Amino acid sequence: MHNMLASPNAMLRLPAEVHVQRRQQLLDALPEGGALLLPTANEVVRSNTTNFPFRPNSDFYYVTGYPEPQAWALLKKSGPDAGFFLFVLPRDRTRETWTGVRHGVQGAKSEFGADEAFKVDDLDRELGRLLEDVDQLYFAFGRHGAKERRLHRILDRVRTGRKPALGPATLRDPAEILAPMRLIKSEAELAVMRRGVEITTEAHIAAMKHVRPGMPEYEIQALLEYTFRKHGAWGWAYPSIVAGGANACILHYVRNDATIGEGELMLIDAGAEVDCYATDVTRCSPANGRFTAAQRDVYEAVLGVQERAIESVRPGFSIDEMHEVVLRELTQAMIDLGALKGDVEGLVESKAFEAYYPHRTSHWLGADVHDVGRYRQRSGPPLPFEAGMVLTVEPGLYFPPDADCPKHLRGIAVRIEDDVLVTDTGHEVLTDAIPKRVDEIEALRS
Ligand code: GLY
Ligand code: MN
Ligand code: MN
């Protein structure tokens, strides 16, 4: 496989100053007396003595860049000890022999910019002390399990200990300030996301070239994920979907253990994760290199809807409005293909379209594949697009084998998904180097 990356040494890592700027922005956004408390993830047991690969919490990593498990971060706006604090696993020669070098308390300060750092074992005492004069505490309640119960105990001790203090009077959702920040991507973030897109592009093209009838889906999965890791991505951003034929009717099909049949389409929904940024791309291609007439009809219908939806992306428009247009166009396509009878508005009203299009058209994309950020404003109307937002556009048509539709459509499923950046004047399709026109896809095999 030749290396088609435009810039093989491009960024796989955000520069550290980006995290410094983010913390300053967050400190500016916090109210007087406010503090933001963010735990990262723990390692999770996979079986007996073996863990799942560690993946940090997205908010925590966004603010700190700190890559190790079990850590906590505190950003404190006011008081004599205002600043940035990290609680981390300490250096430990024995543990490091088994699981690798830790940054430790010194590294948390010298490499990750903490004003003060502590061993995570000292969290109860040191965090309690730091929270005594905090008025409003931002912590994602309901999301951190045992860590939340630990925080409850710490707060209880602040209020009832030997020298009782008031402690936080108000608990607030960190998403209030973090989600709007994460929603708008900077140039530095976009550079990392573009790197993920380059790697994902190579993976999808390799897969479309490699597939043959009779091949197991997992062979394609292996090629995709090999390509992600080969270029230094963390791996996949979400479990790769490789679905032959009717398996693609299962929206999050991840078994990938069937054989791709002669005359079937293969749906791939897979993307690389680079430095905690997701790529999310879906393509469909024929296992034998040529679309059948029925596959082509369905494919062209979805592609037309997808291209028009992408064209509508510009500041001021919204995901909800785009979805409403897509629903109507896909419903018209269902009528044209003979799968539904009636008029578009009636079929939308009765939700008849859900038989063949059961999902939404778009979601935000960033550190999480279904990224943070509201879809509607608090007052109700849809959140308008702004430059710097990144979203997917992913219409599809799915005709399950037992569907009440013309026989020649049964078992055909098509989704086409691109990642789109909102710009000042419109949009940029980040993933547009991944072929999606019928002639381009067939040409990959000729
Ligand atoms: N891959 C998950 C999604 O497309 O939303
Ligand atoms: Mn998606
Ligand atoms: Mn997807």
Image: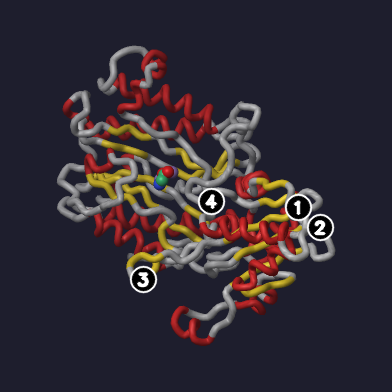
Q: Nearer the viewer, residue 216 or 101?
A: 101
The answer to whether the residue bearing label 4 lies less than 8 angstroms from the nearest atom of ligand 1 is no
Mark 2 CB near ligand 1 (8 Å cut): no
Residue 80 occupies quadrant? bottom right
The residue at 34%/45% (across/down) is 252
Q: How many numbered discs sit on the rendered protein?
A: 4
Is label 4 in a helix, a strand or a loop? loop
Q: Which mark is residue 78?
A: 2
Within 10 angstroms of label 3, few (less than 14), some, or many (20 or more) residues?
A: few
Q: Position of residue 57 (x, y in %)?
A: 54, 58
Amino acid marked by disc 3? Thr
Callout 3–callout 4 Cβ contact below 8 Å: no
- In the picture of the structure, the residue carrying the numbered disc 4 is 143
Question: In what quadrant of the picture does the N terminus appear?
Answer: bottom left
Q: Quadrant of residue 339?
A: top left
Q: Quadrant of ligand 1?
A: top left
| Disc 1 residue crowd, few under 14, some 14–19, many 20+, Cα 10 Å | many
Q: Residue at x 39, y 66 (%)?
A: 45
Q: What residue is rendered at 24% in x and 43% in y?
A: 247
* Percent coordinates x, y for residue 304 in the rendering: 40, 31
Label 3, on which residue?
50
User: Mark 1 or mark 4: which comes first in sequence?
Assistant: 1
The amino acid pointed to by label 4 is: Arg
Q: Are marks 1 and 3 in contact (CB under 8 Å)?
A: no
Cα separation, mark 3 vs mark 4, equals 24 Å
